[in-house]
Image: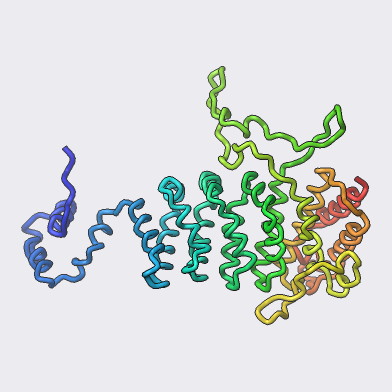
Amino acid sequence: MAQQQPRNLDDLLKWSIAQQGADPDARAANGQTMHDVAADLQAGRRPDLADPGLYDALMGKNEAQMMKEELSAAMDTSRSEDDRVTALDNFEMLIEQIDNANNVNNMKMWEPILSLLTASSSTPRIQHAVLWIVGTAVQNNDKAQMAILAYKPLTPILYLLRSSQDGEVRSKAMYALSGILKHSPSAVALFDKDEQGWMALKGALLDPNVALRRKAAFLINSLLLQDDSVPTTTATTGSTAVAPMPDSINSASSTRSDPHGQPPLERGPETLLSGVAHPPIPPALLSSGLLQALIASLLLSHVHTSLSSLRDVDVPLAGGPDGDQDPRSDLDYSEKASRACLTFVDRAREQHLKLPDPKPAAELFEALQKDLEGPAIEKDASAGIETRWQELGLDRNEVEAFERGWKELLQQ
Protein backbone atom coordinates (compact mmCIF):
# COMPACT_ATOMS: atom_id res chain seq x y z
CA MET A 1 0.00 0.00 0.00
CA ALA A 2 1.42 3.39 -1.00
CA GLN A 3 2.38 5.73 1.78
CA GLN A 4 -0.16 8.53 2.20
CA GLN A 5 1.23 11.93 1.16
CA PRO A 6 0.88 14.94 3.49
CA ARG A 7 -2.07 17.21 2.68
CA ASN A 8 -1.49 20.20 4.99
CA LEU A 9 1.37 21.93 6.79
CA ASP A 10 0.95 19.82 9.93
CA ASP A 11 1.13 16.64 7.87
CA LEU A 12 4.06 18.13 5.98
CA LEU A 13 6.00 18.66 9.20
CA LYS A 14 5.28 15.11 10.34
CA TRP A 15 6.35 13.75 6.98
CA SER A 16 9.52 15.86 6.84
CA ILE A 17 10.66 14.84 10.33
CA ALA A 18 9.88 11.19 9.64
CA GLN A 19 11.94 11.34 6.46
CA GLN A 20 14.87 12.80 8.36
CA GLY A 21 14.80 9.90 10.81
CA ALA A 22 15.02 12.08 13.91
CA ASP A 23 13.74 10.54 17.16
CA PRO A 24 11.41 12.43 19.59
CA ASP A 25 14.08 12.75 22.28
CA ALA A 26 16.46 14.42 19.85
CA ARG A 27 13.75 16.83 18.76
CA ALA A 28 12.90 17.68 22.35
CA ALA A 29 16.56 18.25 23.12
CA ASN A 30 16.69 20.82 20.33
CA GLY A 31 14.10 22.86 22.18
CA GLN A 32 10.99 22.45 20.02
CA THR A 33 8.77 19.49 19.28
CA MET A 34 6.68 18.92 16.21
CA HIS A 35 3.60 19.85 18.24
CA ASP A 36 5.23 23.15 19.20
CA VAL A 37 5.98 24.02 15.58
CA ALA A 38 2.39 23.19 14.56
CA ALA A 39 1.09 25.38 17.39
CA ASP A 40 3.33 28.25 16.29
CA LEU A 41 1.99 27.90 12.75
CA GLN A 42 -1.62 28.06 13.92
CA ALA A 43 -0.85 31.12 16.05
CA GLY A 44 0.87 32.85 13.15
CA ARG A 45 4.26 32.89 14.83
CA ARG A 46 6.07 31.14 11.94
CA PRO A 47 5.44 33.25 8.81
CA ASP A 48 8.49 31.61 7.22
CA LEU A 49 6.55 28.32 7.14
CA ALA A 50 3.12 29.75 6.40
CA ASP A 51 3.74 30.49 2.72
CA PRO A 52 1.10 28.54 0.75
CA GLY A 53 3.73 27.84 -1.91
CA LEU A 54 5.96 26.04 0.60
CA TYR A 55 4.16 22.75 0.17
CA ASP A 56 4.49 22.86 -3.60
CA ALA A 57 8.13 23.84 -3.36
CA LEU A 58 8.96 20.93 -1.06
CA MET A 59 6.72 18.31 -2.65
CA GLY A 60 7.36 19.28 -6.25
CA LYS A 61 4.28 20.61 -7.97
CA ASN A 62 3.49 18.93 -11.26
CA GLU A 63 5.35 20.92 -13.92
CA ALA A 64 2.48 20.65 -16.38
CA GLN A 65 0.27 22.34 -13.79
CA MET A 66 2.91 25.02 -13.28
CA MET A 67 2.98 25.65 -17.04
CA LYS A 68 -0.81 26.06 -17.04
CA GLU A 69 -0.70 28.51 -14.17
CA GLU A 70 2.09 30.62 -15.67
CA LEU A 71 0.39 30.77 -19.06
CA SER A 72 -2.92 31.69 -17.43
CA ALA A 73 -1.20 34.56 -15.62
CA ALA A 74 0.50 35.70 -18.83
CA MET A 75 -2.83 35.75 -20.69
CA ASP A 76 -4.60 37.70 -17.95
CA THR A 77 -4.80 41.29 -19.24
CA SER A 78 -5.99 42.52 -15.83
CA ARG A 79 -2.53 41.81 -14.42
CA SER A 80 0.35 44.27 -14.59
CA GLU A 81 2.93 44.10 -17.35
CA ASP A 82 5.56 43.06 -14.81
CA ASP A 83 3.42 40.15 -13.59
CA ARG A 84 2.71 38.94 -17.10
CA VAL A 85 6.35 39.17 -18.17
CA THR A 86 7.43 37.32 -15.02
CA ALA A 87 4.93 34.57 -15.79
CA LEU A 88 6.30 34.24 -19.33
CA ASP A 89 9.87 34.18 -18.02
CA ASN A 90 8.91 31.40 -15.60
CA PHE A 91 7.26 29.52 -18.47
CA GLU A 92 10.41 29.84 -20.55
CA MET A 93 12.51 28.37 -17.75
CA LEU A 94 10.13 25.40 -17.48
CA ILE A 95 10.36 24.57 -21.18
CA GLU A 96 14.15 24.50 -21.12
CA GLN A 97 13.41 20.86 -20.23
CA ILE A 98 12.71 19.14 -23.56
CA ASP A 99 9.71 17.10 -22.35
CA ASN A 100 8.03 20.27 -21.15
CA ALA A 101 8.84 21.95 -24.48
CA ASN A 102 7.07 19.13 -26.31
CA ASN A 103 4.15 19.36 -23.91
CA VAL A 104 3.47 22.90 -25.13
CA ASN A 105 1.91 21.30 -28.19
CA ASN A 106 0.39 18.34 -26.32
CA MET A 107 -1.36 20.75 -23.97
CA LYS A 108 -2.54 22.95 -26.86
CA MET A 109 -0.64 25.99 -25.65
CA TRP A 110 0.98 27.19 -28.87
CA GLU A 111 -2.09 29.02 -30.14
CA PRO A 112 -2.56 31.24 -27.06
CA ILE A 113 1.19 31.80 -26.71
CA LEU A 114 1.60 32.94 -30.32
CA SER A 115 -1.50 35.11 -30.08
CA LEU A 116 0.41 37.31 -27.65
CA LEU A 117 2.76 38.36 -30.46
CA THR A 118 0.01 40.36 -32.14
CA ALA A 119 -2.47 41.05 -29.32
CA SER A 120 -3.30 44.71 -28.81
CA SER A 121 -2.54 44.34 -25.10
CA SER A 122 0.96 42.98 -25.74
CA THR A 123 3.80 45.39 -25.02
CA PRO A 124 7.29 45.00 -26.51
CA ARG A 125 8.40 43.33 -23.26
CA ILE A 126 5.65 40.73 -23.59
CA GLN A 127 6.46 40.15 -27.27
CA HIS A 128 10.14 39.78 -26.37
CA ALA A 129 9.31 37.17 -23.70
CA VAL A 130 7.07 35.21 -26.10
CA LEU A 131 9.75 35.15 -28.80
CA TRP A 132 12.19 33.89 -26.21
CA ILE A 133 9.78 31.05 -25.39
CA VAL A 134 9.50 30.12 -29.07
CA GLY A 135 13.27 30.12 -29.57
CA THR A 136 13.90 28.06 -26.44
CA ALA A 137 11.22 25.50 -27.26
CA VAL A 138 12.44 24.75 -30.78
CA GLN A 139 16.18 24.97 -30.12
CA ASN A 140 17.71 21.55 -30.84
CA ASN A 141 14.19 20.06 -30.62
CA ASP A 142 13.04 18.65 -33.95
CA LYS A 143 9.62 17.61 -32.59
CA ALA A 144 8.84 21.11 -31.37
CA GLN A 145 10.12 22.57 -34.65
CA MET A 146 7.60 20.52 -36.60
CA ALA A 147 4.74 20.93 -34.13
CA ILE A 148 4.83 24.73 -34.09
CA LEU A 149 4.50 24.97 -37.88
CA ALA A 150 0.83 24.01 -37.63
CA TYR A 151 0.18 27.36 -35.93
CA LYS A 152 1.78 29.50 -38.68
CA PRO A 153 4.36 31.19 -36.44
CA LEU A 154 6.40 32.71 -39.27
CA THR A 155 3.85 35.41 -40.11
CA PRO A 156 3.89 37.22 -36.73
CA ILE A 157 7.61 36.59 -36.21
CA LEU A 158 8.53 38.07 -39.59
CA TYR A 159 6.20 41.00 -38.97
CA LEU A 160 7.99 41.84 -35.71
CA LEU A 161 11.41 41.33 -37.29
CA ARG A 162 10.45 43.75 -40.02
CA SER A 163 8.31 46.29 -38.16
CA SER A 164 8.98 46.38 -34.42
CA GLN A 165 10.42 49.65 -33.17
CA ASP A 166 12.12 47.81 -30.31
CA GLY A 167 15.61 46.51 -31.09
CA GLU A 168 15.40 43.78 -28.46
CA VAL A 169 12.17 42.47 -29.99
CA ARG A 170 13.73 42.38 -33.46
CA SER A 171 16.74 40.53 -32.05
CA LYS A 172 14.58 37.92 -30.31
CA ALA A 173 12.48 37.55 -33.47
CA MET A 174 15.68 36.55 -35.29
CA TYR A 175 16.44 34.07 -32.48
CA ALA A 176 13.00 32.46 -32.84
CA LEU A 177 13.19 32.46 -36.65
CA SER A 178 16.61 30.81 -36.69
CA GLY A 179 15.46 28.08 -34.33
CA ILE A 180 12.43 27.26 -36.48
CA LEU A 181 14.39 27.19 -39.78
CA LYS A 182 17.38 25.18 -38.55
CA HIS A 183 17.67 21.93 -40.55
CA SER A 184 13.94 22.01 -41.33
CA PRO A 185 13.08 21.83 -45.04
CA SER A 186 9.36 22.20 -44.20
CA ALA A 187 9.96 25.44 -42.32
CA VAL A 188 12.31 26.83 -44.98
CA ALA A 189 9.75 26.00 -47.68
CA LEU A 190 7.11 28.03 -45.79
CA PHE A 191 9.61 30.84 -45.28
CA ASP A 192 10.52 30.80 -48.97
CA LYS A 193 6.86 31.06 -50.01
CA ASP A 194 6.16 33.97 -47.66
CA GLU A 195 6.66 37.13 -49.69
CA GLN A 196 7.94 38.87 -46.58
CA GLY A 197 10.49 36.19 -45.64
CA TRP A 198 13.57 37.16 -47.60
CA MET A 199 12.72 40.85 -47.43
CA ALA A 200 12.55 40.70 -43.63
CA LEU A 201 15.94 39.00 -43.57
CA LYS A 202 17.33 41.65 -45.91
CA GLY A 203 15.93 44.32 -43.61
CA ALA A 204 17.82 42.72 -40.72
CA LEU A 205 21.06 43.22 -42.70
CA LEU A 206 20.26 46.94 -42.87
CA ASP A 207 19.30 47.22 -39.20
CA PRO A 208 21.13 49.81 -37.07
CA ASN A 209 21.61 47.05 -34.48
CA VAL A 210 24.93 45.52 -35.54
CA ALA A 211 24.30 42.44 -33.38
CA LEU A 212 21.16 41.77 -35.42
CA ARG A 213 23.16 42.13 -38.64
CA ARG A 214 25.57 39.47 -37.37
CA LYS A 215 22.69 37.11 -36.64
CA ALA A 216 21.20 37.72 -40.09
CA ALA A 217 24.51 37.00 -41.85
CA PHE A 218 24.99 33.88 -39.75
CA LEU A 219 21.47 32.63 -40.58
CA ILE A 220 22.02 33.21 -44.30
CA ASN A 221 25.20 31.13 -44.19
CA SER A 222 23.43 28.43 -42.16
CA LEU A 223 20.60 28.21 -44.69
CA LEU A 224 23.13 27.85 -47.50
CA LEU A 225 25.06 25.15 -45.64
CA GLN A 226 21.95 23.07 -44.94
CA ASP A 227 20.71 23.44 -48.53
CA ASP A 228 20.97 19.95 -50.01
CA SER A 229 18.88 20.71 -53.11
CA VAL A 230 21.62 19.82 -55.60
CA PRO A 231 19.85 19.25 -58.93
CA THR A 232 20.44 16.16 -61.02
CA THR A 233 20.19 16.10 -64.82
CA THR A 234 17.62 13.68 -66.21
CA ALA A 235 18.85 11.40 -68.97
CA THR A 236 15.76 11.72 -71.17
CA THR A 237 15.04 15.44 -71.20
CA GLY A 238 18.24 17.06 -70.02
CA SER A 239 16.20 19.14 -67.57
CA THR A 240 17.09 19.52 -63.94
CA ALA A 241 15.19 18.40 -60.87
CA VAL A 242 15.82 18.47 -57.17
CA ALA A 243 17.29 15.20 -55.99
CA PRO A 244 14.87 13.32 -53.68
CA MET A 245 15.78 12.55 -50.11
CA PRO A 246 17.13 9.06 -49.45
CA ASP A 247 14.52 6.58 -48.24
CA SER A 248 16.46 6.15 -45.01
CA ILE A 249 15.69 9.77 -44.20
CA ASN A 250 12.41 10.27 -46.01
CA SER A 251 10.52 7.45 -44.35
CA ALA A 252 9.79 6.25 -40.86
CA SER A 253 10.69 2.80 -42.16
CA SER A 254 14.27 3.67 -41.25
CA THR A 255 13.48 2.26 -37.81
CA ARG A 256 12.81 -1.27 -39.14
CA SER A 257 15.13 -4.10 -38.16
CA ASP A 258 17.44 -5.72 -40.65
CA PRO A 259 16.21 -9.25 -41.67
CA HIS A 260 19.61 -10.62 -40.68
CA GLY A 261 19.15 -9.59 -37.08
CA GLN A 262 21.00 -6.30 -37.17
CA PRO A 263 19.75 -3.55 -34.81
CA PRO A 264 17.24 -1.11 -36.36
CA LEU A 265 18.50 2.03 -38.02
CA GLU A 266 18.16 5.13 -35.92
CA ARG A 267 15.15 7.24 -36.86
CA GLY A 268 16.19 10.59 -38.26
CA PRO A 269 15.07 13.98 -36.96
CA GLU A 270 11.38 14.79 -37.39
CA THR A 271 12.34 17.79 -39.49
CA LEU A 272 13.85 15.49 -42.14
CA LEU A 273 11.03 12.95 -42.24
CA SER A 274 8.37 15.12 -43.87
CA GLY A 275 9.45 14.37 -47.45
CA VAL A 276 9.57 18.10 -48.25
CA ALA A 277 12.55 19.02 -50.41
CA HIS A 278 14.74 21.86 -49.18
CA PRO A 279 14.20 24.93 -51.38
CA PRO A 280 17.33 26.07 -53.26
CA ILE A 281 18.71 29.08 -51.41
CA PRO A 282 21.11 30.75 -53.93
CA PRO A 283 18.35 31.80 -56.40
CA ALA A 284 16.37 33.36 -53.54
CA LEU A 285 19.40 35.34 -52.35
CA LEU A 286 19.91 36.69 -55.86
CA SER A 287 16.29 37.61 -56.60
CA SER A 288 15.75 39.25 -53.21
CA GLY A 289 18.90 41.35 -53.44
CA LEU A 290 20.30 39.76 -50.28
CA LEU A 291 23.55 38.71 -51.96
CA GLN A 292 24.09 42.18 -53.35
CA ALA A 293 23.47 43.73 -49.92
CA LEU A 294 25.90 41.30 -48.29
CA ILE A 295 28.69 42.06 -50.74
CA ALA A 296 28.05 45.81 -50.65
CA SER A 297 28.32 45.84 -46.85
CA LEU A 298 31.80 44.31 -47.13
CA LEU A 299 33.20 46.87 -49.54
CA LEU A 300 34.74 50.26 -48.93
CA SER A 301 32.15 52.98 -49.48
CA HIS A 302 33.95 54.49 -52.50
CA VAL A 303 34.12 51.04 -54.11
CA HIS A 304 30.45 50.41 -53.45
CA THR A 305 29.35 53.68 -55.02
CA SER A 306 31.52 53.10 -58.09
CA LEU A 307 29.87 49.80 -59.03
CA SER A 308 26.97 50.04 -61.46
CA SER A 309 25.49 46.79 -60.11
CA LEU A 310 25.03 48.38 -56.66
CA ARG A 311 23.57 51.76 -57.61
CA ASP A 312 20.06 50.79 -56.54
CA VAL A 313 21.01 48.50 -53.65
CA ASP A 314 20.29 49.53 -50.09
CA VAL A 315 23.28 48.71 -47.92
CA PRO A 316 24.11 49.11 -44.23
CA LEU A 317 26.74 51.79 -44.65
CA ALA A 318 26.55 52.83 -41.00
CA GLY A 319 25.21 51.38 -37.80
CA GLY A 320 25.30 51.72 -34.05
CA PRO A 321 23.14 53.97 -31.87
CA ASP A 322 24.56 57.11 -33.49
CA GLY A 323 24.66 55.76 -37.04
CA ASP A 324 28.41 56.14 -37.30
CA GLN A 325 29.65 52.55 -37.12
CA ASP A 326 31.08 51.23 -40.39
CA PRO A 327 30.02 47.59 -40.94
CA ARG A 328 33.54 46.78 -42.14
CA SER A 329 34.98 47.72 -38.76
CA ASP A 330 32.91 45.03 -37.07
CA LEU A 331 35.10 42.01 -37.78
CA ASP A 332 32.53 39.57 -36.41
CA TYR A 333 29.90 40.76 -38.88
CA SER A 334 32.38 40.96 -41.75
CA GLU A 335 33.60 37.42 -41.10
CA LYS A 336 30.04 36.03 -41.05
CA ALA A 337 29.00 37.98 -44.14
CA SER A 338 32.14 36.95 -46.04
CA ARG A 339 31.62 33.30 -45.24
CA ALA A 340 28.02 33.58 -46.45
CA CYS A 341 29.28 34.95 -49.79
CA LEU A 342 31.87 32.18 -50.10
CA THR A 343 29.25 29.53 -49.29
CA PHE A 344 26.86 31.08 -51.82
CA VAL A 345 29.38 30.62 -54.62
CA ASP A 346 30.07 27.05 -53.57
CA ARG A 347 26.37 26.10 -53.42
CA ALA A 348 25.44 27.98 -56.60
CA ARG A 349 28.19 26.21 -58.51
CA GLU A 350 27.07 22.80 -57.19
CA GLN A 351 23.48 23.56 -58.21
CA HIS A 352 24.55 24.70 -61.69
CA LEU A 353 22.82 28.02 -61.10
CA LYS A 354 22.33 30.03 -64.27
CA LEU A 355 22.96 33.69 -63.55
CA PRO A 356 20.38 35.91 -65.30
CA ASP A 357 23.07 38.46 -66.14
CA PRO A 358 26.70 37.38 -65.55
CA LYS A 359 28.16 40.89 -66.02
CA PRO A 360 26.93 42.52 -62.76
CA ALA A 361 27.68 39.31 -60.88
CA ALA A 362 31.23 39.33 -62.20
CA GLU A 363 31.60 42.93 -61.07
CA LEU A 364 30.42 42.07 -57.54
CA PHE A 365 32.55 38.95 -57.12
CA GLU A 366 35.65 40.62 -58.48
CA ALA A 367 35.20 43.58 -56.11
CA LEU A 368 34.85 41.24 -53.13
CA GLN A 369 37.88 39.22 -54.26
CA LYS A 370 39.99 42.39 -54.41
CA ASP A 371 38.77 43.49 -51.01
CA LEU A 372 39.62 40.15 -49.37
CA GLU A 373 43.10 40.26 -50.86
CA GLY A 374 43.53 43.93 -49.98
CA PRO A 375 45.12 45.35 -46.82
CA ALA A 376 43.68 44.71 -43.38
CA ILE A 377 42.03 47.61 -41.57
CA GLU A 378 44.44 47.08 -38.71
CA LYS A 379 47.61 45.27 -39.72
CA ASP A 380 49.48 43.24 -37.14
CA ALA A 381 52.82 42.04 -38.45
CA SER A 382 53.61 40.17 -35.24
CA ALA A 383 50.47 38.06 -35.71
CA GLY A 384 50.98 37.72 -39.45
CA ILE A 385 47.90 39.78 -40.30
CA GLU A 386 48.52 41.80 -43.44
CA THR A 387 45.47 41.18 -45.62
CA ARG A 388 41.74 41.53 -45.11
CA TRP A 389 41.15 37.77 -45.41
CA GLN A 390 43.67 37.13 -42.64
CA GLU A 391 41.99 39.79 -40.50
CA LEU A 392 38.65 38.00 -40.92
CA GLY A 393 40.02 34.60 -39.91
CA LEU A 394 39.84 33.08 -43.40
CA ASP A 395 42.65 31.05 -44.91
CA ARG A 396 44.34 31.20 -48.28
CA ASN A 397 42.69 28.00 -49.53
CA GLU A 398 39.22 29.46 -48.93
CA VAL A 399 40.04 32.66 -50.79
CA GLU A 400 41.52 30.77 -53.75
CA ALA A 401 38.54 28.40 -53.85
CA PHE A 402 36.22 31.41 -53.89
CA GLU A 403 38.00 32.87 -56.91
CA ARG A 404 37.91 29.59 -58.81
CA GLY A 405 34.27 29.09 -57.85
CA TRP A 406 32.84 32.41 -59.00
CA LYS A 407 34.77 32.31 -62.26
CA GLU A 408 33.41 28.82 -62.90
CA LEU A 409 29.92 30.00 -61.94
CA LEU A 410 30.05 32.72 -64.59
CA GLN A 411 30.73 30.07 -67.25
CA GLN A 412 27.79 27.81 -66.36
Looking at the image, residue 147 sits to the left or right of residue 311; the answer is left
Horizontal arrangement in the rendering, residue 412 relative to residue 313 (left or right): right
Quadrant holding the N terminus: top left
x, y percent for residue 269: 57, 40
Tell me the residue at 82%/37% (across/down): 240
In this picture, residue 286 sits left or right of residue 151: right
Query: Which of these two is toward me, 58 or 305?
Result: 305
Q: Residue furthest bottom?
A: 322
323 up-or-down from 149: above or below: below
Q: Nearer the viewer, residue 27 or 13?
A: 13
Counting from the top left corner in percent of width and height, residue 367 is at 88, 64
Residue 162 % position (x, y): 64, 65
Residue located at (84% from left, 43% from top): 352
Residue most toward the front?
120
Q: Report if residue 294 is visible in the image.
A: yes
Quadrant assignment, res 319 = bottom right
Q: Is residue 254 above or below residue 183?
A: above
Query: Visible in this render: residue 29?
Result: no
At horizontal 57% and vertical 64% (from top left) the residue drawn is 172
The quarter of the displayed image where residue 384 is located? bottom right
